[in-house]
Image (spheres, rainbow, N blue to C red):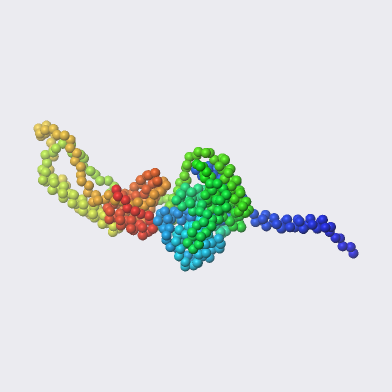
Amino acid sequence: MQVRRSSPARLGLFLFLATWVAAIAPATLNAAPYAAHVIDARSGEVLHSQNADTRLHPASLTKMMTLYIAFEAVRNGEIKLDTKVRISKHAASEPPSKLGLRPGQEIAFRYLLRAAAVKSANDAATAIGEAISGSEAAFAKRMNWTAKQMGMTRTTFKNAHGLTESGHLSTARDMTILGRHVIYDYPQYYNLFSRKTADAGIKRVAHTNRRLLDSYRGADGIKTGYTRAAGFNLVASAERGNERVIATVFGGKSTASRNAKVAELLDLGFRRAPSRAPLRKPERPEYAGNVGATPGASGKTIRLVGSVQKSLRPKARIARTQIQVASVASTAQADEAKLQAGVAAAIVAATEGVEPAAAIDSAPRPAARPSELVLASTSSADIIEPVEQEIVTRVSTSGGQHWGINVGRFGSRYQAEKALLRTALAEMSTLDGSLRKVRQSPQGFDANFVGMTRETADLACRRLKARNITCFMIGE
């Protein structure tokens, strides 16, 4: 019986092919889909796009939304940067990358922000969500609501960190939109994303994107992400002169190849972006908060009624009249006292939760005009001599109601008006009777309640702050 022996050349070819297949097979099977999106950050104009609307795993790009909501919460007084956050078992048990937090440990909120932005720590991201919304599930709902307000129509968040979870998906376009909001909505915090290292309280951490920050001129952020399902993701921003470009890549094969691709896309963006372009900042999404019903759940508009909206003033006197001065003076003093009693009753009723209208109806009313009052005659015989026109003004009876409160500054008049309505509903007992007023300035739209006494304004602010609603007193 003869045994056929393979020639050395054939055997060598076989071993080469086997080795080659073994080397490339895992990469081929595990390769994440590629997507890219490039925009001019100033105008939002799309400069390049490939598979940008394909729903893919965002990985730690998710933390951009976690941090965005954290900035929003600090701005609106929900939490302070120095607030001590107690770490839960759930947050401490998150897999790497992590800061190394322990259950029961307390750490300042600012350190959690640094750890999530710079090191991309999963335990810090979960702790941020729990500190703001009470649970990661509730925080995910707020993330999704905010994403919808931004126009991220193909994004669904299930957690605060971005680790692979069924249904936790986004797109290159949506993540680019989010990156643009991070830059323009909270510029005071954007420097977090360009720090090479940062003090995170329990240790110093290094930036996951430091290689691109070091190698690409003008790069200043924003966020990296990696999981096996997602591949190597990155949302990068760079500024050169008056131009700023944002480039997003999903599905990179390695850190080096992803960074090279992002640098190529940024170069493409700077070539295509005009040297001068109008700055059209994105409209900041409506503030969601954690107070009351789910934002946007109802389209009804509720109006507060019962407060006096118009006060009739006497017309200017044109000529001197023959009046019994003493009688008129005494009557005016009596009317003024009754009017003050009615206003005081209305304020007390509003504080105690009684309908202001009912309180005003029950207040004393001024007496009818005296029958002996002598009116000015129109006959020529009664006119002694012509006189100059006299304008009579009335001393204010507002009781020092020249104070108000501010409950926030917003990006649009609509947002400011909605904030006023939401706050009025949350604190009807002290704000009923005040006027809602939006004042525009170069910095935005201030939401104010005006026409209050100093005592009422101070009480309203203290009660609102107890509800974690931003408030400070203003003088009219």
Q: Position of residue 235 (x, y in %)?
A: 55, 50
Please report the residue visible at 50 percent of the width from the left and 38 percent of the height from the top.
276
17 vs 433, nearest the viewer: 17
- Residue 158 makes an appearance in the image: no
Q: Position of residue 409 (x, y in %)?
A: 39, 49
Please report the residue visible at 76 percent of the width from the left and 56 percent of the height from the top.
16
Q: Position of residue 47 (x, y in %)?
A: 56, 42
Please report the residue visible at 14 percent of the width from the left and 48 percent of the height from the top.
331
Q: Please, is residue 390 above or below residue 296 in the view?
A: above
Q: Is residue 449 left or right of residue 4?
A: left
Q: Is residue 164 left or right of residue 463?
A: right
Total marks shown come to: 0
Please report the residue visible at 62 percent of the width from the left and 51 percent of the height from the top.
257
- Residue 98 makes an appearance in the image: yes
The quadrant holding residue 22 is bottom right
Q: Please, is residue 465 above or below residue 267 in the view?
A: below
88 vs 100, nearest the viewer: 100
Q: Quadrant of the N terminus?
A: bottom right
268 vs 295, nearest the viewer: 268
List the single residue furthest toward the top: 380
Q: Position of residue 433 (x, y in %)?
A: 29, 52
List the single residue furthest toward the right: 1
Q: Please, is residue 122 above or below residue 441 in the view?
A: below
